[in-house]
Image (cartoon, coloured by chain):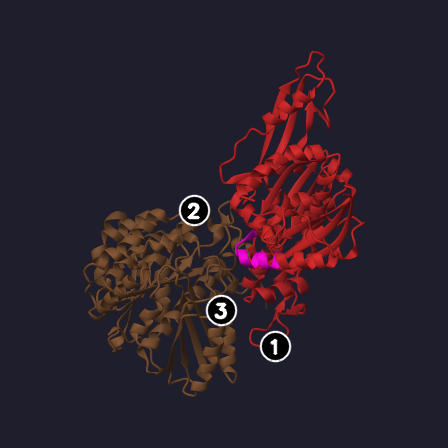
Chain colours: A brown, B red
Amino acid sequence: MENREILTPSTRIKVMGVGGAGNNAVDRIRLEMKVMDGLELCCVNTDMRTLADSPVGDQHLLGRNLTRGLGCGGDPHLGKEAALSDSESIARIVDGYELVFLISSLGGGTGAGASPIIAKIAKQSGCLVIAFVNMPFTFEGERRFKQASQSLEELREICDAVIPLPNDVLLQEEAAQESVLHAFSKADEWITRGVRSIWAMLSKPGLINLDFSSLREVFNARGGKTLFGVGSGCGPNFIRDALNDLMQCPLLHVPDFSKVADNLLVNIVGGTDLSMAQIEGVMAYITEQFGSKASTTLGAVIDEGKQQSIEICVIGTTDLGGLRPLRTKRSASSPWEKGRNRLARNSASGKPGTTVEGRKPDRLEPANSVQQDLGIDGLEGTRGYFEETGRNEFGGQDLDVPTYLRRGIRIVLT
Amino acid sequence: MSSKIIAGVEIGTSKAVVLIGEIVHGKTLNIVGMGMTSSGGVKKGEIIDFNAASDCTHKAIMEAEESAGASVEAVYLAQTGHHLETFFSDAEVTVKSSKNIVHRSDIRRLLAEAKRKQLPEDRAIIHHIQNGFYLDEELVESPEHLEGHKLEVRYWNIHGSIKRMSDSIHIINGFGLRVEDLIVSSLASGKMVTTKEERGNGVLVVDIGSGTTDYVLYKHGHVVYTGVLAVGGDHITNDLSIGLRTSSNLAELLKIKNGKASLQPKSQDDRVMLVGDLAIGDRSIARSGVCQIINARVDELFRLIGNDENLAPFFSSSQWGTVVLTGGTSKLKDIEKVAEKALGLPVMLGGNPSWVAEEIQGPEYSTALGLLHFGLSYNHVKEFKERKRGGALMEGVKKLFGI
């Protein structure tokens, strides 16, 4: 019964940019993607001026009565209040969509404050929510960084997948002469590629078709780390180039990221000359690299206009498996309840816009309890190589994170 | 009974080292065997996988016993890690006798007073290190029979988490051996790489291992301060693996082969290959970038030590001596230059005493050698009484650990 859902062109996807940085990212997607069947963009902000600058038509001002359209001034509490005061209109924005991409920067007030609220509302209306969030530089200060980490942890509890893009890491991506702005546009580029890949998977005909319910399966576990990377290649050695590019993707080499996924989604967009044997080669390499123990889901799409070219996108999630006592409180921890929740979710998505009674408290409780519980412990399980060890906090910084990233030193390797 | 076989065991982050020594007539130490395995289950100096750590430690002990051709009677075990904490304590008494001659009972009262501090239930003292007696504010080695009014003593105390310590004790017990005493790594290695004169003048020893950096400050020949940072060579490797987007193993190899702590000018020509096999993922990278990553970490490490408030008076004092580096990570090229710049003091690379055999001369053996040295002094007849008094606390620890 569960996988009876068949993808129809009516799979509706909403891309929401929240806050200034989120709006910019959405603007970029609009410029880059010429064809976007089933993909709708919208901007949400507390700052009227930033909204007005955006070429995206669908705009929503939050908390008009609280901020008078002047923004949050970096205060996440104000951002949260603004979102709460407009929760009904947010519910209308996401109503009827199966998949919501939430894009924001957790360094800002609107991004950090409003994003978890918006995500929660979207989840309540039965959407699958994937968030791309920008993390501020460590050297921007302890307070800002803590606030962003807290917001990130809240989002991890609510969303189906959260992909953090740390500025510390993005800084490494820019050429020596360029400004920090370039790093931000690089972030937008990663987001665009991620969104486009998932969209292509759902909407284009493929060698291996993936439907929406398999996407749901991959994002079944919440609260854990996410693995995300994209790589592309073209020319005579396009497969090798793409794999090299993928392994070089900076987002796979962030202290915060998981190197191993329990559920892995691999999506390949190739040219007309892409063969099944080549796809198998790619898959063998990727599963070896990311050691997806439980399951790997593969989708392969053909882009008619391309030859000798491939774009690979990997998204993985980890099951927490009782690693963190915090999570075991979740109501979905027993297999029986997990199954029931899955059923409930699937039936909910079958009828977009409706929520199943009795599921709501499940969704809300963990998020609420986490908000109170959030301390340093809330960040456990995201520390790569030093994961199993005690925390190494010193003067508000985690010493296990590479020094050059925390100091904002740009490493030039080429 | 004229000889005793003891072992110094360090369950380190990258390797387990066992040195076996024979103590002859309670005063001569011969090193008769060694064993070393690359360890598993230890990160940042703490045991995270008991079975893995246990297996490789046992293997190293076996190897050492085989090479020594003898069985170990007692083990001196190194301790490090984030769980170690320290505090300073002092006490003073008025000399009671009529002629103001310090009597043994005055000293006993004083020592009891100095060790009065109670620790939380899950913590146990590893060392009470006496910083010397002060008789009427003058430093004296042994106050008994001297004349004075006010007698003071200062102690540097190191305590650790009982759970952490018992984990490592259980590993040794699991091999059927008894742990004679726990010794904090910095104290063991510090004694090895400095001379008595240096400790008299004042010296800071920084032992940089794979998982931790242990440091100890000597002044007037006494230990006055110790510290642990859970940062070591593994962090350099992890930084490289993230920065170069490669595996930890490759990053470690690159660090050993091409790593350098100092910065170097950017150059297109000075490049290193990441793997060297030209497979997917192999590529050439600028050596200057590798140095940038290592430099940031090493510089930060020394600045953290330099900013340790407790060391501040010593760094600012002009009569202050030198800094000595030891531990496996001190083999990193140019590390002393970076340390000198960050600390603003002359820095030297430490060496083990010349009587030590060539194969264990490397800085990574300082701790294990120091453990044997401690074993020797504990077994020394002269210190036997002292040991018994201090030993009472160790007995207490043992009871707590159910050994």
Q: Position of residue A133 (x, y in %)?
A: 39, 60
Q: Which residue is mark 2?
A: A143
Q: Residue B117 vs residue A340: left or right?
A: right
- N-term-proximal mark, 3 vs 2: 2
Does residue A127 sit above or below B17 in this rendering? below
Chain ID, mark 1 = B
User: Disc 3 vs disc 1: which is toward the camera?
Assistant: 1
Residue A249 badge: 3
Circle 3 crowding by C-alpha within 10 Å: few under 14, some 14–19, many from 20: some
Circle 1 crowding by C-alpha within 10 Å: few under 14, some 14–19, many from 20: few
Query: Which residues are the magenta region?
Result: B46-57
Query: Do callouts 2 and 1 mark residues in contact (Cβ within 8 Å)?
Result: no
Q: Position of residue A247 (x, y in %)?
A: 51, 71
Residue B278 badge: 1
Total marks in image: 3
Does residue A144 sit above or below B270 in this rendering? above
Q: Quadrant of the C terminus of chain A?
A: bottom right
**B393 vs A174, nearest the viewer:** B393
Query: Hey, what amino acid is under mark 3?
Result: Cys
- Check disc 3 and report its element: helix, strand or loop: loop
User: Disc 2 vs disc 1: which is toward the camera?
Assistant: 1
- Check disc 2 and report its element: helix, strand or loop: helix
Residue B333 appearing in the image = no
Query: Do callouts 3 and 1 mark residues in contact (Cβ within 8 Å)?
Result: no
Tell me the CA gap for discs 2 and 1.
45 Å
For the stretch drawn in magenta, the main secondary structure is helix
Q: Residue B210 vs residue A181: left or right?
A: right
Chain ID, mark 2 = A
In which image quadrant can residue A303 be found? Answer: bottom left
